[in-house]
Amino acid sequence: MSAQVWPHISHEQLIKEEEDSLAAELEWLLEALQEALPSLKSGLEECLALLTPQEPGTTLALSTHRSETIKGFVTRVALDIIDISTWTGDPKNGSFISGQLRLLNEIINEAKAVMKGGEEVVGGKWWEDDFTGDETDLNLPPFPSLSPHITLTPSSLLLTIRTLVPNPSASAPSTNGTSTPSSTSGPSLTGLSLRNRLAQILAPMPAPTHDEADRTFQYRGTEVKVRDKVRVEAQDPSLMAVGAKLSAVGREVEGWRGRMAIVMGEEM
């Protein structure tokens, strides 16, 4: 089946009519977008308001379920995961508006990625961005025994406490090519040393079973392994609301980007 224009017009005239039609559709689309922008701006401002510093902050419980491993609380004063800027440019310029929508979409995706957490986001690598406050405030022993680290999940704050030990392979004594260490003095088998060695033989420490058991890390200038790892989440209603609003705004922005791409013949 084919369609024909009647009365018949030349090919050049047909191309011109198509271009005029797309231009008119783009103009209508840009006007409709201007009406939708206040809603998008309002959604982002609501996210910003939920994360703005407010004294005395939000106190969240940090306690492990069905155990006394961790008992405490954390006060969240503010977070910074989103940047709202003012557009300056011609609102009737399709290329400009398309670029601004692409930029806004990237900002929203970055904010959502930060809320998901993980090692790829800023502050996600605990061995590089460890707790820098006063460790006495947490009533924790100093390094190298414990390493506290707080990051985000889509709906909560996540506290991970790791017990660190020096990597045995990195601190092992050098050998002279045989199985005998180069040092001429052997291990002491008297008193407390003998008792500790017997305790290790009779009741060896169980092997770690967490997801970082086979990895080594450079932490504060020392190569370490994670012996124990405890995670506890503090559910945060504000984070849950921000996640839902960001997803809604992101879907709307992607919808407008798709309409603009169709009319302008662009790739998303």
Image (spheres, rainbow, N blue to C red):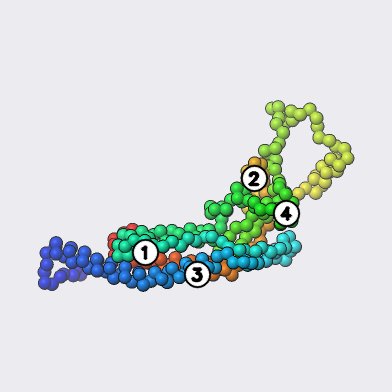
What's under tag 2, amino acid-wise? Tyr
Out of 34 and 167, give the one closest to the viewer. 34
CA separation in Å, label 1 and label 4: 50 Å
Q: What residue type is labelled 4?
A: Thr
Residue placed under numbered mark 4 in the picture: 136
Q: Which of marks 3 and 1 is in front?
A: 3
Residue at the image position 11 percent from the left and 69 percent from the top: 8
Q: Is residue 27 left or right of residue 138?
A: left
Q: Few, some or many C-alpha atoms within 10 Å of disc 1 (few <14, some 14-19, many ≥20)?
A: many
Q: In this view, does 252 lie to the left or right of 82?
A: left
Assign a secondary structure to mark 1: helix
How much space separates mark 3 and mark 2, taking CA atoms?
Answer: 38 Å
The part of the image, by quadrant, that contains residue 153 is bottom right
* Label 3 to label 4: alpha-carbon separation: 36 Å
Residue 91 seen in the figure: yes
Amino acid type, label 3: Glu
Q: Are marks 3 and 2 in contact (CB under 8 Å)?
A: no
Quadrant where the C terminus sits is: bottom left
**Looking at the image, is 61 positioned above or below residue 200?**
below
Q: Would you name the residue on which mark 2 appears?
A: 219
Identify which amino acid the numbered label 1 is placed on.
Arg
Sequence-wise, which precedes: disc 1 or disc 4? 4
- Earlier along the polypeptide chain: callout 3 or callout 1? 3
The image shows residue 190 at horizontal and vertical percentages of 87, 37
Q: Which residue is labeled 3 in the image? A: 46
What's the distance in space between the residues labelled 2 and 4, CA to CA? 19 Å
Please tell me which of labels 3 and 2 falls first in the chain. 3
Please name the residue that numbered disc 1 is placed on: 257
Q: Which residue is drawn at 35% across and 69% down?
A: 33
